[in-house]
Amino acid sequence: MAKGSQRGPNARRDARDRTKKQHNQGKRAKSYTELTRRPAWQSPTRLWLAGIGLVALVLVIIVVVNPFGHNTSSGLPTIQFVGNATCPTSGQQPYFAPSPAPVNGLPPVGQAIDEMPHTHVSPPARVIYNHNPPTSGCHYNLGYPNAPIAAGAYDKVIQPEYWVHNLEHGYVVALYNCPQGCSAQFQQLRTWYSSLPDAGGLTYPRVLILPWPTMSVPFAMVSWDWYDPMKTFSLDEVKRFYANHLGQGAEPNAP
């Protein structure tokens, strides 16, 4: 037999070692490939789509939970504490701002309005209210039924300095502006008022019905920090606002 064709024990052992080494290298390469292979759900396209979906979900949550854009920890919209020369904020503290008055644990009805100081002023001082109709501000303090005025329905305009005090006591006020008359709606309001239960400890409901000829809508509801304009009268809306804001002034136990 030729010398080159002979395979001794060492040659056979070297061959086995090379075969084993190649096999182990193949296993390591396969393992590395398996470990580094990106699952199908981690593909760039799917990750991009998932990111877009997450952003959309966050935006939906913001709109649903915070429909007003800026919310306080109470979940209600943020309002400012504001004043003017006739009702300055200097030395005063708000009742509720930066959150408006509470809403009896219900989804808010109406628009939250910036809060003015609640300082007492004396007649004949006149207050310029930042919002028309007023939803807060300086007012007279003459005792019930002068300021705050007596609960009930009125057919004559009353200076707001008298009835803004009612808002402070948790009243809900229905306002109407009907140059051509609205006797049917006024009667509906009076009938509704007559059906209301007396406020706790009182012999009348905490409700006023007043004419307010300078507002831009024919009907509106107001309470401390809240305003609900109505282009068309709706007794259902009146009732919703009443349930939402009754008794939510800063002094709800006062007459």
Image (spheres, rainbow, N blue to C red):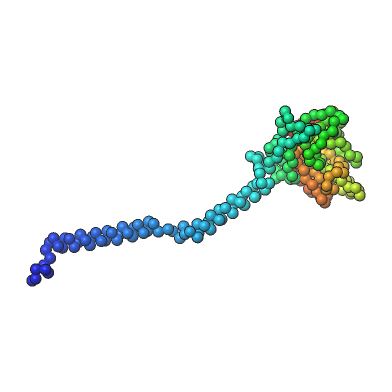
Residue 11 visible here: yes
Q: Position of residue 123 (x, y in %)?
A: 86, 29
Residue 118 visible here: no
Which image quarter is the N terminus in? bottom left
Farthest residue to the front: give it. Answer: 85
Q: Position of residue 169 (x, y in %)?
A: 78, 33
Indicate whether 128 appears above or below 43: above
Q: Nearer the viewer, residue 216 or 26?
A: 216
Q: Nearer the viewer, residue 64 or 85?
A: 85
Q: Residue at x 15, y 63 (%)?
A: 12
Q: Is residue 43 left or right of residue 150?
A: left
Q: Is residue 224 left or right of residue 66?
A: right
Q: Residue at x 68, y 43 (%)?
A: 77
Which image quarter is the C terminus in? top right
Q: Residue at x 77, y 43 (%)?
A: 227
Q: Position of residue 117 (x, y in %)?
A: 75, 33
| Image quadrant where residue 121 sits | top right
